[in-house]
Each structure stands twice: as structure tokens, then as C-alpha cells.
Amino acid sequence: MNKFTALGLSAAMAATLAGCSVTGGDLIRPGEPTATLIVINDTYGNIDGIAISDCDNFTYGLNRLADGDSVAPGQARSFTLSAGCWDVSTNDFGGGEARKRMTLSAGDVMRYSVYE
């Protein structure tokens, strides 16, 4: 194992022990009220990655879309989340990226449009 791999594993273990998650954490925390986030693709290309994590997490986490799934231009994808602060990152196959921090209250329906 090289030192970069060891360093990455150490950081992941430290984050896990600190209560953070490499995956971005659960979108719904048991016993908490929920809200809805709708990610709208207002770009000219497919969004092939949507990462969502609690604002306290050290990473945006893994792609919340299923393998091979994408959001076509003009289309949207909906997520149910616990109310609170969330970091959202989207990317497309061409390398474009958009990031936003948002706070959702219980019962909210938040629409997040991703532009070029």
C-alpha cells in the first residue's frame, strides 16, 4: 500500500469515527421531519451525478443517481431529505459542475435549477 492510499484510508476512518460519512450520509434521519428537494436540469447536457450530503459532512458523498441514470435537459429528479442544512453537487459528463448549500424546513418543497 502506498502512502497516498494509506493517507486516504486514514482520513476515511477518522471521518467515520467522527460521525461523518464517505457516502454523504443518510438522506433521511430517523425521527426527523422531512422535506423534498427537486433538482431541475436547465443545462444543455445530461446531469449524470447528484451528490447530496449533510452540511456537517466532510464530503459531498457518492452519486445519488442509480448506475447509468441521468437527468436529461428540462427534466428533474426528486429527493426526500430530513429537514436541515444540505450540500448539493451536480455534474455532467462533460465536466461541468454546480454546487449549492441549502437549508430545508419541515414540509418544504425546494426547487434547485442547475444552469450552464
Image: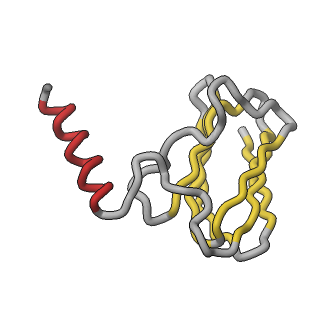
Residue 8 is drawn in which quadrant?
top left
Horizontal side of residue 57 vs 93, given as left or right = left
In the displayed structure, 69 sits above or below 22; it is above
| Residue sticking out furthest to the front | 30
Instruction: Residue 25: give x, y in percent of width and height.
Output: 49, 55
Q: Which image quarter is the N terminus in?
A: top left
Residue beneath the point at 77% across and 35% down: 43
| Residue sticking out furthest to the right | 74
Report the number of numbered marks: 0
Residue 47 is drawn in which quadrant?
top right
Task: Between residue 116 and residue 21, name the one nearer to us.
Answer: 21
Instruction: Residue 82: give x, y in percent of width and height.
Output: 64, 67
Instruction: Residue 86: give x, y in percent of width and height.
Output: 58, 62
Q: Inspect this view and state whether residue 113 appears.
A: no
Residue 57 is drawn in which quadrant?
bottom left
Q: Which image quarter is the C terminus in?
A: top right
Residue beneath the point at 82% across and 32% down: 73
Horizontal side of residue 71 vs 13, given as left or right = right
Residue beneath the point at 46% across and 46% down: 23
Task: Between residue 96 and residue 2, name the one nearer to us.
Answer: 2
